[in-house]
Image (spheres, rainbow, N blue to C red):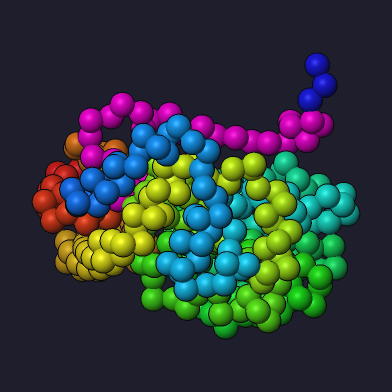
Amino acid sequence: MKVNPRHNQINRVFVDNMFYSEQHRLHASERDQPWSPELLAEFTSTLDRQIRYYPNIPQAFDLLSKHLGCGINDLNIGEGSDRILKTAFELLSGDPQWSVVIPDPGFPMYGVYASMYFNMIRQAQPTNGHITARDYLPLIDDTTSLIVVSNPYTPYGTTMSFEDITTLALAAKQHGATLLVDEAYIEFANSTSAVALINEYPVIVVRTLSKAGGAAGLRIGYSLADSNITKQLRDYNSMNAISAPATAWIATLSKYEHEVTHYVASVRANRDGLQEWLTKHGIDYIPSQTNFINITGRLNLNNFVVKHTMMLLGQHQIFTRVSIPAQPHTLEQLKQAILEAI
Ligand SMILES: Cc1ncc(COP(=O)(O)O)c(C=O)c1O
């Protein structure tokens, strides 16, 4: 059997602890709050049709660009931001001499796609959970075709300043590279989006409806970039970029924006409240600008699925990653479980 020679470089870790669990899922930054019955009734009313016919992709582009207030030619849509990331790696690779810069640690698929498409992979590393332009600049040169930044920065939840992102956009431009800014959690952060840079620099901003958009199961992600870059990215899309139920979701969501706004406000308030509460109880954590928080130590929280990760913060330490619930009763149960676990 002949397989892609790069295949043995790919180090893929599959998550196997999340299926069929009856516990609260707080390990993957999903929305815990149900959508309103009105919204769900509207969404499901078209499902029969959505299942039987191929998706109306032009309509999805039209509705999402109106919803975001962006030019339709600057927008690309795909099955989750994960698929959009892959599309960018596909477009921006191909020459064996080219290199990619990714953050380490980072969203695991950066490493997977880097191994699939690049011979030369350079890793920018944070100091004390913060990653800055200074950590990237020494790794960027004329071989660089793609620079990946996540802002806020997964897995820590910290942010990169707009000045630093602009510095990296300029470095990308000077070296004929493209800067990809993954803004999966930007709605929860007090950060300026890199979208402001797309007309002046080779910048692709990647976003998702899985986190603030609360529709992780539907798999909808998108990118915003200058129309020239976007046109090329679209060449790498699947025949049908997203499913028909996903297009129906975009149509429904554009009428129920307030449910998203309300959810995001609740998560932000609960995150800030939880951080204060942790401080008051003397429990260490990494201050976060996302909808998750890393609490120091390995906590097994009764009735909750959480994620334990080893991260460098001064030294290697184990953290318990917990998604922030929007629902007050879940938040109270979470606090109780934390007190029982420490
Ligand atoms: C930083 C980051 N980027 C991208 C993704 C992918 O999200 P999705 O494919 O659901 O849009 C995630 C998911 O957790 C993430 O944390």
The x and y percentages for residue 298 are 32, 43
The kind of secondary structure the magenta stretch mainly shows is: loop
**Residue shown at 66%/71% (left/top)?**
226
| Quadrant of the drawing holding the N terminus | top right
**Residue shown at 69%/56% (left/top)?**
233
Q: Nearer the viewer, residue 126 or 166?
A: 166
Asked whether 180 falls inside the magenta stretch, the response is no
The x and y percentages for residue 208 are 47, 56
The x and y percentages for residue 124 are 64, 61
Residue 76: which quarter of the image? bottom right
Q: Nearer the viewer, residue 59 or 10?
A: 59
Q: Which residues are magenta?
A: 4-32
Q: Is residue 96 above or below residue 263?
A: above
Q: Is residue 83 above or below residue 92?
A: above
In the current view of this chain or complex, which residue is farthest to the top? Answer: 1
The x and y percentages for residue 224 are 58, 66
**Residue shown at 58%/46% (left/top)?**
241
- Whether residue 145 appears in this view of the structure is yes
Q: Is 285 placed left or right of 99 in the picture?
A: left
